[in-house]
């Protein structure tokens, strides 16, 4: 999770500019004269649009909020069904439930992402959307899932909160569906502390995002907010200027993050080659190298390996650490019993994998030593 490791004078400088250049205006709307017409959230959106080659970007208060807004823009309501995968983060399910819909859970493949085969079997007349999650930096079988959704005329949302910078067929993940979602919370590839955004090439959807996240404001030009019109009941999911200032500095570091993460990832991968089974990378995709995942069938060996990783200070990530928050089997408070049953095969797959987080504050040599130590235990 490198973004939070790199916070330094550059983020501080951008934040200070709010006070030196914009009279301390922390709100993303209005106060034009005081802020001297500098809108940092809008600047951040524009830069994200350029980096990810998406026509429209709407920044919001969190990735979770972004998922909910995406679902609302698709008309998801009480009685509808939304399909997502078992290996996930609870936020996806929470957003579905908050719209009054029922989460339908697919199993995963050995690549630990959504099974397109299972997806096609779960679509019904009640299916309103599919949320595909690219877990821990790796692309799902995106082309197959796109094909299923297109055939069934079901909108596809890419939850790309954990795979910023990863690509499929040379195009960035989060840009190859109806709506893409990013998170900027403190554990993500780049961070604004809390925050997120929606990407789309559809102007109608973008206008919905823009209005819904800001209490339904039409945001009519040349009208003060106090007399602006509303065309829907909305909510407050706005990003602040402080968050955007940090985001602007962080986004400038994205290429460095991807490049340096890859060095550490490869340091382990090279040692493991032909000796340890790594998580498969789907054909045509390049991960963001945020997490290296490998398979160990023997339960006792897995236990020794996890203990060793914790002793090195590297630890594990989601597998097995924090698995309860990233696997639907444990979400009996949010998922119906019939859907919990759909997670049992996934459980057998996931419990054999271990995830190593990539930290930039740890040297490449540290990961090489860790890999050597792991090979003695495998």
Image (cartoon, rainbow, N blue to C red):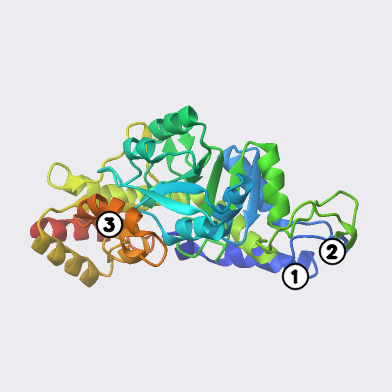
Give coordinates of residue 242: x percent, y percent.
66, 66
Give coordinates of residue 289: x percent, y percent.
36, 48
Residue in front for this viewpoint, 298 or 120: 120
Q: CA distance from mark 2 to mark 3?
A: 47 Å
**Residue at numbered disc 1:** 19
Q: Please tell me the numbered disc located at residue 115.
A: none
Please give the name of the residue rendered at 67% of the width and 46% of the height, measured from the top-left corner.
Answer: 46
Say which quarter of the image contains residue 301. bottom left
Look at the image and tell me whether residue 190 can be seen.
Answer: no
Question: Is 67 drawn above or below residue 130 in the view shown?
Answer: below
Question: Is 201 drawn above or below residue 209 in the view shown?
Answer: above
Q: Is residue 273 left or right of residue 228?
A: left
**Disc on the earlier residue, 2 or 3:** 2
Please give the name of the residue rendered at 39% of the width and 60% of the height, measured from the top-left corner.
Answer: 335
Q: Secondary structure at mark 3?
A: strand
Question: Is 254 drawn above or below residue 65 in the view shown?
Answer: above
**Residue at numbered disc 2:** 31
Look at the image and tell me whether residue 330 can be seen.
Answer: yes
**Disc on the earlier residue, 1 or 2:** 1
Q: CA distance from mark 1 to mark 2?
A: 14 Å
Q: Secondary structure at mark 1?
A: helix
Question: Is 11 drawn above or below residue 232 in the view shown?
Answer: below
């Amino acid at each position: 999770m490198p973004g939070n490791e790199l916070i330094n004078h550059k983020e501080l400088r951008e934040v200070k500019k709010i006070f030196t250049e914009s009279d301390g205006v922390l709100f993303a709307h209005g106060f034009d004269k005081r802020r001297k017409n500098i809108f940092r959230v809008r600047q951040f959106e524009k830069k994200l649009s350029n980096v990810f080659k998406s026509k429209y970007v709407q920044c919001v208060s969190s990735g979770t909020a972004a998922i909910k807004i995406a679902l609302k823009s698709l008309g998801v309501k009480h009685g509808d069904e939304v399909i997502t995968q078992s290996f996930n983060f609870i936020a996806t399910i929470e957003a579905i439930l908050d719209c009054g819909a029922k989460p339908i859970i697919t199993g995963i493949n050995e690549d630990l992402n959504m099974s397109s085969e299972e997806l096609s079997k779960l679509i019904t007349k009640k299916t309103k959307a599919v949320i595909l999650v690219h877990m821990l930096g790796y692309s799902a079988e995106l082309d197959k899932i796109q094909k299923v959704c297109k055939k069934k005329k079901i909108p596809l949302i890419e939850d790309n909160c954990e795979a910023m910078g990863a690509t499929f067929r040379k195009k960035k993940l989060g840009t190859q569906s109806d709506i893409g979602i990013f998170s900027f919370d403190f554990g993500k590839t780049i961070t604004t502390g809390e925050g997120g955004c929606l990407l789309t090439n559809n102007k109608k959807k973008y206008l919905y995002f823009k209005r819904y996240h800001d209490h339904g404001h039409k945001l009519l030009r040349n009208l003060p907010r106090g007399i602006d019109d509303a065309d829907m009941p909305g909510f407050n999911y706005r990003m602040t200027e402080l968050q955007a200032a940090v985001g602007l500095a962080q986004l400038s570091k994205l290429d460095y993050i991807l490049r340096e993460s890859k060095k550490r990832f490869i340091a382990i991968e090279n040692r493991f080659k032909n000796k340890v089974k790594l998580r498969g990378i789907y054909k045509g995709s390049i991960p963001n190298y945020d997490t290296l995942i490998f398979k160990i069938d023997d339960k006792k060996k897995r236990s020794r390996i996890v203990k060793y990783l914790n002793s090195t200070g590297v630890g594990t990530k989601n597998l097995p650490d924090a698995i309860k928050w990233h696997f639907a089997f444990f979400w009996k408070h949010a998922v119906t019993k019939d859907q919990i049953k759909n997670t049992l095969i996934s459980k057998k797959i996931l419990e054999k994998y271990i995830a190593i987080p990539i930290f930039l504050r740890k040297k490449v040599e540290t990961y090489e030593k860790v890999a050597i130590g792991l090979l003695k235990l495998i």
